[in-house]
Image (spheres, coloured by chain):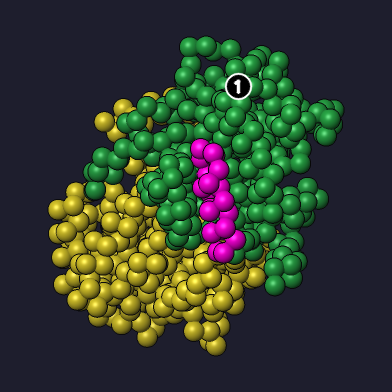
Chain colours: A yellow, B green
Amino acid sequence: MNCLFKEERSYDIKVLDCTIRDGGLVNNFHFTHEFVKAAYNTAIISGVDYFEIGKIVSPTLMSTKEFGPWNFCNESDLRKIVDNKQSKMKIAVMADIGRTLKEEILPKKESVIDLIRVACYIHQIDEAIEIVEDSHKKGYETSINLMAVSKISEEELDGFLSRVSKSNVDIIYIVDSFGTFHSREIRLLVNKYLTATKNNGKKLGIHAHNNQQLAYSNTIESMDLGVTFIDATIAGLGRGAGNCPLELLFGYLKNSDYYIFPVLKFIREHITELKNQISWGYDIPYMLTGQFNQHPKTAISFNKEGKTDYTQLYDDLMVVSV
Amino acid sequence: MNCLFKEERSYDIKVLDCTIRDGGLVNNFHFTHEFVKAAYNTAIISGVDYFEIGKIVSPTLMSTKEFGPWNFCNESDLRKIVDNKQSKMKIAVMADIGRTLKEEILPKKESVIDLIRVACYIHQIDEAIEIVEDSHKKGYETSINLMAVSKISEEELDGFLSRVSKSNVDIIYIVDSFGTFHSREIRLLVNKYLTATKNNGKKLGIHAHNNQQLAYSNTIESMDLGVTFIDATIAGLGRGAGNCPLELLFGYLKNSDYYIFPVLKFIREHITELKNQISWGYDIPYMLTGQFNQHPKTAISFNKEGKTDYTQLYDDLMVVSV
């Protein structure tokens, strides 16, 4: 705590740890059972409210050899991890348009899942709302996470907000998929979502990426403005530049019911080793895709090929962006 | 550029590249001539306004064996680098209280130096103003960089601002030495400095550290509020968690007179290699010293000793902080 500006902050928020789900995008969900179990236990004892354990994709549509169990989250796999009946922590999974079959989603009372988060692009809004309504009927909490909002027009965003406001969705997520928004843009965006939801009881969430080292900053800015569902991952684990690091968020939430200590322990015991196997986090190629408002896939390929010609990448991205 | 909120931003700012000076704190200023020359040329062609090439410490007070030439910045060493008479880029050096002897500072007309930045702690304000006034008389631009402002009370800060406002200093720097300020604290701090200087013609500067991944964010926040001297370093090179990365800043200043391209080239040709020799940048130990508002020296030792017991470090820092 600095000596100036001793202010008491308090937040009525829910922290959602998506370490396994967003991290799974880096290694096709090939985490060991021990890793997922340790992440789950860490989340419980550090006070996390929601633990997103993976995606709920149909095994008829993606290869269960290529992708690990947390891409599919079938109920028996879930129950190998989720065994702490004393915990009030809720379990979330992410549904993908075109890959999740709503017929395969069990009624809530037969599942340990509490929250179904539906990720979609702007042209998939009908399908997204279909899954939301089905899940809502089955007894789940639901969210819609509109990806790549930095690529759409203000009119499209207004249309989206108006549509989802009329649905039964509980939470609407602000998603900076490409890590492209600066602080003042994120404030404009958050205020737009706040205005659209102030009279309809929807909650707002924030999911940030770290391409420009702004994931944490944009997350706490959003929280200060009134966003209440806060996504973070341990050590920022996540696709490309990764996410808002949980340990930074918990540093901000000092004197709250969240505890950084178990997270630090997990980092020492599990993340250091994982760093030797897979790569994520801020670097120059991810910075450039963020600056150019592009999907990180170009940077991911660039890094995989061991390239370092950043000026060439800059030129390539510029051509795509104009 | 994202598709929403297409706003034109323009800033009347000066970018100060302190790669060599703050980077010198990592390797005792043992950069090769080629490295410093390349950094200097990169700064010129990318549009940097001020290039801080090192410290101006007396060779009678620190060992010229232990510390490289850029800790001392004697005039003949400077002239081996500063040879581009066509460039409008200015040269800055940093003076340290107790280690810089003002008698050794040449008159401006005999030196390639343009700006003398005086770094001080709150109890060194008299000595700092003495160097400022002497340098001012000799013809230099001057700044005062009050370090560790996060450790002093608001009354002390008010006293400081009142004192320096009456001096001949040109620029007053807001320095987040420990990388401890969050976005809204940096806004409170900047507004305090702005209020204190609005009628006396002093300019304001920002120098941020990246312990909580907020160096860039806090820098652009300050800039948006009206701070005009903006410190950054290539690849964030600097003590501990490092500084605001110049390449992120230039991404924000798109469509300006600043160019990211030469910076990317420098990173490829020089930074990648340097990363094999010395360490800097955000990590868990630096995050913890930032969260606890502590000097990074504890984290620097922790890293040097190859320790990874973050929970022990957390406990140690907590004991010091209460």
* Quadrant location, the C terminus of chain B: bottom right
Q: Quadrant of residue A322?
A: top left
Q: Nearer the viewer, residue B135 or B9?
A: B135
In the rendered image, the vertical position of residue A301 relative to residue A242, given as above or below = above
Q: Is residue B161 magenta?
A: yes
Residue occupying the point 32% across, 69% down: A204
Q: Residue at x 57, y 22 (%)?
A: B40
> Left or right: B164 with respect to B249?
right
Is A117 part of what is drawn in magenta? no
Query: If the image is split into quadrants, where does the N terminus of chain B sit?
Result: top left
Task: Tell me the magenta residue range.
Answer: B154-175
- Label total for image: 1
Q: Amino acid at mark 1?
A: Lys
- Write the residue at 46% across / 76% down: A10
Above or below residue A64? Residue A304 is above
Q: Residue A318 at x, y = what percent?
A: 34, 29
Q: Residues within 10 Å of mark 1 (few under 14, many from 20)?
A: some
Closest to the observer, B179 or A164: B179
